[in-house]
Amino acid sequence: MKIMDIYNPKIEVTKENFVEYLDAVSRHPDVINAHRKWEDLDQEWKDITKHSNDDIEIMLAATKVRIAKEEKDAIFDHISRLAEEASEKVNIIEEYNKETIGKCSAIADVEELSVAWHETRKKGIGGSSLSELLGFHWKSRPGNMVYMDEQELDAHWLKTSIEKCTSVEHVYNPDSGVLYRGHKVEPALITRYALTHNKRVAVSKATWQGEDDVQVINLDGIILDDNGDPEGILECKTSSREWTWQDGVPIHYRCQVLWYLRALGFKYADVAVKFDTGVFEVYRVYANETVDGTEDTYPIEHYVPQLMERWEEVLFFKNNHKELWGESNLLNKELDMIAQISLGDILEESDIKILTDADAFLLSFKAPYERMDKCFTKPVSAQIQINREINQYYSQRSQPIFYDTLDIMDSLQPFKGDMLDLVEELNSVIAIDTATYKELIQYDDMPEEIINASALRRAVDVEPGRSDFTSIEEFHNWLKEKEK
């Protein structure tokens, strides 16, 4: 039977057969074949990008990766839903409803990934970003640490300041892909751990704060002793790259659980991981270990003073937004462009939503997965523009969306002419970025209204202290204040 035909209600899942069922679903031939196909094509694409100067060859290789990823996502999304449903049937995960846990106190009890949840997490530093904020490069491995230079570390802290100073107005929770699956499969990982380790495990929606206010944490699972009292934590992970765990828990996850253990005062954390090969593993991390588990680094406590010093800078920026604008080129570089697009009241309130929706639409086609070299995005964004976006918005919107199709490779220069001819026929156009905007305004016969989408998004989404405008009038009032 194909994995996509398996439907949980037809199968009786119990405590006795849950592990066998989960393993069988996770190691079904369709699952393994989808992962191997994506893995092979992904490596092929990487090899081509290293050794080929043929843009079309690179584009085609990347397209194969994207298609393989879409096929893999469909299958892996399905089995993650099966796993979630099976864990609900077994129903052995307990609820933890107390106001304290270890040395931490609950500061919120809200739905995970909601606006309120994100707002609460801005009150301090969680575990997921800690490794970067300590200056550990993502290439670090246990026993082989790689450190950022001072400039790179400063950039991470500046980014953190912007995030902590910006209100969360809207939240997009994906219904497919890695983040979606991680959320869905978590109850199954907790259930599997409880059954295979003969442990009681509880969950809590609470966000916890340590004795140091900077420690703000959320827990996947709380390991209970025989009396029902917390004794450790369970952190759940999924991974498509099994080799990154060959030396044990990766550095960024070690930093995360060590930060949690320090806040709680607990002695150990178990990290349960499901690999895309269908393999399940559990790793233990003790609170007194160093961040990489060797003598090359120190226990987490050693790094707290530098974190606290940096956090004081973040708190300063939260109360002094103008200084944060002055520090960040990201926030400053397009203020002139924002002024230009505001002239003449050419924008309406609906334009902001059009830009947001169009961005989400195109991004889903630009890359085979989250991190992709720019060599792929140029030709594919051009093709998608002509085939999909212009036709869609030309027929449905008064202001069609024009994306970054001007700065394309030599092999697609004839296509550029076709695009410019099409743009000339429009009443108004929205350029995807400042480079496209500047080039468009140089041409004759262009529409009178050319909006710089990048500048608009910078105003709408990035200003510290807010993430949205409720009306175009509010946008103009904000702009006038900035120009004073």
Image: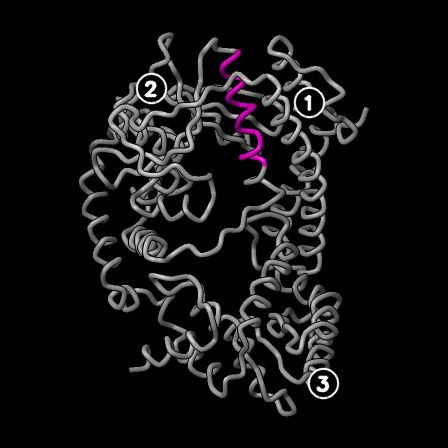
Disc 3: which residue: 425
Dot placed on the residue nearer the N-terminal end, 3 or 2: 2
Q: Can you give x and y, in whole percent of width and height, for residue 420 in the image?
A: 68, 81
Residue 248 seen in render: no
Quarter of the image containing the C terminus?
bottom left
Q: The magenta stretch spans which residues?
A: 181-195
- Residue at 64% across / 43% down in the picture? 42
Q: Secondary structure at mark 3?
A: loop
Disc 1: which residue: 25
Viewer-closest of 425 and 224: 224
Dot placed on the residue nearer the N-terminal end, 1 or 3: 1
Viewer-closest of 138 and 448: 448
Q: Can you give x and y, in whole percent of width and height, for residue 336 in the image?
A: 40, 80
Q: Is residue 441 above or below residue 237?
A: below
Disc 2: which residue: 268
User: How far apart, in angstroms, are the residues tagged by discs 2 and 1?
Assistant: 30 Å
Dot placed on the residue nearer the N-terminal end, 2 or 1: 1
